[in-house]
Image (spheres, helix red, strand yellow):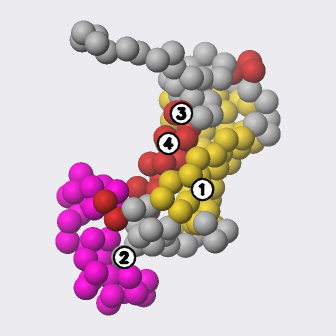
């Protein structure tokens, strides 16, 4: 570590302390700047995610967020909330149920469905818009740090 860098103690819940039904959530506002930066990072800079004109010609009528951008917040919630630091994301089966528009608030929710062998967990993953509409539903399998 460089001078002046202070590491916080990482947050994680050990496998033996996790119970079926444990849950966590986080909220994100999908602001224009976030969507544009994500588009720039993945090289998708001329699509209906960033162009009002292109978006106006789609079934959505206005700009929407990338589905994989939303999915990335599931990974953040797993790595920071439940189970936390050191979690290895093994698999995820999911569907995109509804679009998320620029400025929408979304709630990312994770719930432990099952404890598996080898420190693995099966998680229910959902994202809902602020209006309660489901955006993403799925199940993930992760391996805990300890």
Residue 65 placement (x, y as % from top left): 40, 66
Say whether disc 1 or disc 4 marks the residue closer to the N-terminus.
4
The N terminus lies in which quarter of the figure? top left
Check the image and name the residue furthest to the front: 4
Q: CA distance from mark 3 to mark 4?
A: 8 Å
Dot placed on the residue nearer the N-terminal end, 2 or 1: 2
> Residue 91 appears at what percent x and percent y?
53, 42
Q: Residue at x 72, y 41 (%)?
A: 23
- Give the mark nearer the N terminus: 3 vs 4: 4
The Cα–Cα distance between marks 1 and 3, rounded to whole angstroms, is 15 Å
The label number, if any, that marks residue 80 in the structure image: 3
Specify few, some or many for label 1: CA neighbours under 10 Å numbering under 14, 14-19, or 20 or more. Answer: many
Q: Which mark is residue 63?
A: 2
The residue to which callout 4 is attached is 75
Q: Nearer the viewer, residue 119 or 52?
A: 52
State the quadrant of the C terminus. top right
The answer to which image quadrant residue 143 occupies is top right
Which residue position is annotated with label 1?
107
CB contact under 8 Å: marks 2 and 1: no
């Amino acid at each position: 570590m460089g001078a002046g860098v202070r590491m916080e103690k990482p947050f994680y819940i050990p496998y033996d302390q996790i119970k079926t039904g444990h849950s966590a959530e986080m909220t994100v506002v999908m602001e224009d700047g976030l969507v544009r930066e994500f588009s720039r990072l993945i090289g998708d800079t001329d699509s209906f995610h960033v162009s009002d004109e292109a978006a106006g010609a789609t079934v959505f009528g206005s700009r929407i967020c990338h589905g994989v951008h939303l999915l990335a917040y599931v990974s953040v919630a797993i790595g920071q909330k439940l189970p936390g630091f050191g979690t290895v994301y093994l698999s995820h089966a999911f569907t995109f149920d509804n679009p998320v528009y620029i400025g929408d608030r979304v709630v990312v929710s994770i719930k432990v469905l099952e404890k598996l062998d080898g420190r693995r967990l099966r998680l229910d993953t959902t994202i809902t818009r602020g209006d309660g509409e489901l955006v993403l539903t799925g199940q993930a399998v992760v391996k805990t740090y300890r």
